Amino acid sequence: MTNNGMELNQIIDTIYPLTAKSKNLIKESIIETKFPKGHILFKANKIETSIYFIKKGIARAYAYSDDNQITFWFGKEGDPIVSMQSYVNNQKGYEDVELLEDCELYELKIEQLQKLFLEDIQIANWGRKFAEFELIKSEERLIALQFNTATQRYLALLKNYPSIIQRVQLSHIASYLGITQVSLSRIRASIK
Amino acid sequence: MTNNGMELNQIIDTIYPLTAKSKNLIKESIIETKFPKGHILFKANKIETSIYFIKKGIARAYAYSDDNQITFWFGKEGDPIVSMQSYVNNQKGYEDVELLEDCELYELKIEQLQKLFLEDIQIANWGRKFAEFELIKSEERLIALQFNTATQRYLALLKNYPSIIQRVQLSHIASYLGITQVSLSRIRASIK
DNA sequence: TAACGTTTTTATCATTTGTTAAATAGTTTC
DNA sequence: GAAACTATTTAACAAATGATAAAAACGTTA
């Protein structure tokens, strides 16, 4: 990540190395967009038609449990923003995605990508690795949530992603960790 | 699922419909095996070379937290058994997989499958959908763990998979739910 | 069916987390 | 810089869960 944000080439290559020809097919389907802090990129109960990659900025996904928002995902430079229900099953998602800073994004229409999956074996394998890596991340999250205490999860977040504390409200981090904001405050006080 | 277990054709087709030719390429790479109840199919800290599909029986994946086993996955007829770290990154996994009943399994060598991914675009897309569906399942698990109370998660398990209570020890179910066995007993007593 | 081993439940107390409300700290706006 | 607004911490009590141990229920086998 440079000051100008994450390069598209790097994002694509990190998932799966492609020939120039195949990579260009993907790149031709991608457009750059910008949105201000606070923009709601995805709305719950809507079929999203695009996926994004974050060039610059951070975002969170949240859903409602009764009245309160629960954040279950953070994305930073290089990360994909995907409504999985839309992307995989062409169904309504359950999450909002909010941009927590002014963001520069790479947008890729799901329909165009799916067409490429059927036409280009390299891109099909690129899409396979994309899902596989997201799956690894999701499994690691799941294990952490099931195996570790709230304090351990907080310390792990600090270690793996120190800047998040500077960039994101503690109330969002608390719900991401599966605890209340009050409880997170107590944990922060206890580890000093 | 019939009395004879889940058919291989059905398992393959449910993931992604293939032409007869592509499907045969996969089927030629699959062999049937049997193991008795209690067999340890995957060992932690080992690179697994196969994935499996359950024709008949059930299994669980667990890892150790200090001294005690924590179950984080159950599989039943039709479900895949995969060490994701081995399958995706060719690295050691952190889980044991134990067969909880006498099992009939379809075995597929990862190396052979990966070769097919590079040769056959339909199979590459089959592998893509395979990872995508596993991703959806993992995300749903994650959301449930983060959003719902232990009682809600127990009731959901009862609803979505009623037979599991008959087939699996409550101690395994408790750790799957992220609670102790004592706590699960209390929940069971409270909802009667 | 009696005896044994395993699984599940119950009981007790300690610890953690949730809930509500108030106090403090930090930011933005005029 | 004061006022208004938002975010975070602290306090007090309630509820849920953990830990340990003992009792009860269940299964297996002789």
Image (spheres, coloured by chain):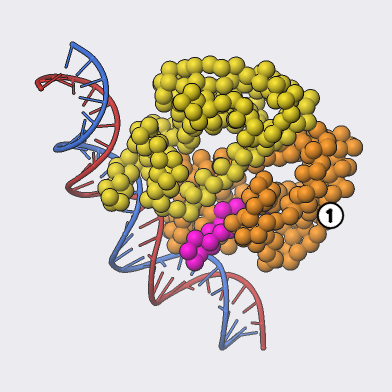
Chain colours: A orange, B yellow, C red, D blue
User: Which residue is painted at 79% across and 62% down in the image?
Assistant: A34
Location of residue B178 in the rendering, given as x and y in whole percent from the top left corner: 42, 43
Location of residue B54 in the rendering, given as x and y in whole percent from the top left corner: 52, 26
Location of residue A158 in the rendering, given as x and y in whole percent from the top left corner: 57, 49
> In the rendered image, which residue does mark 1 sit on?
A31
Q: Amino acid at mark 1?
A: Ile
Asked where in the image residue C29 lies, by quadrant, the reply is bottom right
User: Which residue is painted at 71% across and 21% down in the image?
Assistant: B25
- Whether the magenta-drawn stretch holds residue A71 is answered as yes
Magenta region, residue range: A58-77
Using residue B169 as the reference point, say whether residue B50 is left or right of it: right
Using residue D9 as the reference point, say whether residue B185 is left or right of it: left
Query: Can residue A164 be spotted in the picture?
Result: no
Query: Can residue B185 be spotted in the picture?
Result: yes
Q: Residue furthest front?
A: B2
User: Which residue is painted at 77% across and 36% down in the image?
Assistant: A124
Mark 1 falls within which chain? A
Magenta stretch secondary structure, dominant: strand
